[in-house]
Image (spheres, rainbow, N blue to C red):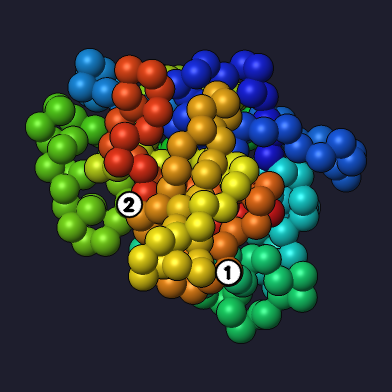
Amino acid sequence: MTHALGRCSRRTALVSIAASAWPLPASPLPLPLPLPLLAARYSDRIDPAPYLASEKHDGVRALWDGRVLRHRSGRTVAAPATFLAALPAQALDGELWLGRGTFDALSAIVRSERPDEGAWERVRYMVFELPGDGGRFADRAERIARLAAGAAKGRRPPFEAVAQAPAGSRAELMRRLDAVVAAGGEGLMLHLGAAAEAAGRSDVLLKLKPELDAEARVVAHRQGQGKYRGRVGALEVEAATGQRFLLGSGLSDAERADPPPIGSFVTYRYRQLTPSGVPRFATYLRRHESF
């Protein structure tokens, strides 16, 4: 993962997807990775008609350069040789995914330094971009579909093309969002069909979810009162913008007894920002996995 807080606006830093905007450790990466495309937030002011929409997969972002699979941080993904051997020689960008509502199980598989080949048989690499392939995104999406279809002949490859379809009108888009969420999905991604390949946070890629999410760093543990006496009542966290606020809702009893340590990062959900930039109705979701 390449982080560039200096290039992020106050708003986009708060609504980053699946990644924090804090600097990475100073140790060099084995191979420098280009800055991947990161989604901005969809708003009702945007006409969705020129976009292609797909389900937002709650997985782990991974970039394949034709021979090495890496996290956005640049760290190598410890995937089995059989999984990697089935990937094409072409560069890919996508999400490692187990299915809806399975992020914790996926995280456990991906974090393991000794890959469990049996567990990895359930992991799918949901591909949504061809880095360096050029042309319009709509054309690249068609090439991804053909690439996956060709690899699927006679066997089940570990990668699939993320299904893309015209977003249509705002009403059509909202109906699709409702259907995905009702089925247990997280939301939608919208990619501008005419867009050339882009990097960093850009309006050519948008996320649409019932709730927003972002990451923050734990700076203190607030002791609980009443039934939470002797355990953590809330986490004091700091967003990338420097805003500090409390996360109490969403913590399980186990997490209150053994909370995310100070200095670690957590993911939280919220509905909107106050005029001063503080997340409204912020709820703890899980410890953020930086990989």
**Compared with residue 144, is residue 81 higher up or lower down, i.e. above or below?**
below
Counting residues from the N terminus, which is met first, the one under dot 2 or under dot 1? 2
Image quadrant holding the C terminus, namely: bottom right
Spatial CA distance of label 2 from label 1 is 27 Å
* x and y, in percent, of residue 30 in the image: 88, 45
Report which quarter residue 157 is drawn in.
bottom right
Instruction: Count residues near mark 1 (Cα–Cα under 10 Å), then give few for <14, some for 14-19, many for 20+.
Output: few
Q: Nearer the viewer, mark 2 or mark 1?
A: 1
Q: Is 64 in front, or is 46?
A: 46
Secondary structure under the numbered disc 2 in the rendered image = loop
**Residue drawn at the location 56% of the way across and 62% of the way down:** 259
Name the kind of residue labelled 1 in the image.
Asp
Name the residue beneath numbered marker 1.
Answer: 258
Q: Is 290 in front, or is 204?
A: 290
Q: Residue furthest bottom?
A: 118
**Compared with residue 178, is residue 125 higher up or lower down, i.e. above or below?**
below
**Residue drawn at the location 77% of the way across and 75% of the way down:** 114
Name the kind of residue labelled 2 in the image.
Glu
Left or right, 119 with reference to 210: right
**Residue drawn at the location 43% of the way across and 48% of the way down:** 247
The mark found on residue 186 in the picture is: 2
Instruction: Count residues near mark 2 (Cα–Cα under 10 Å), then give few for <14, some for 14-19, many for 20+.
Output: many
* x and y, in percent, of residue 12 in the image: 47, 24
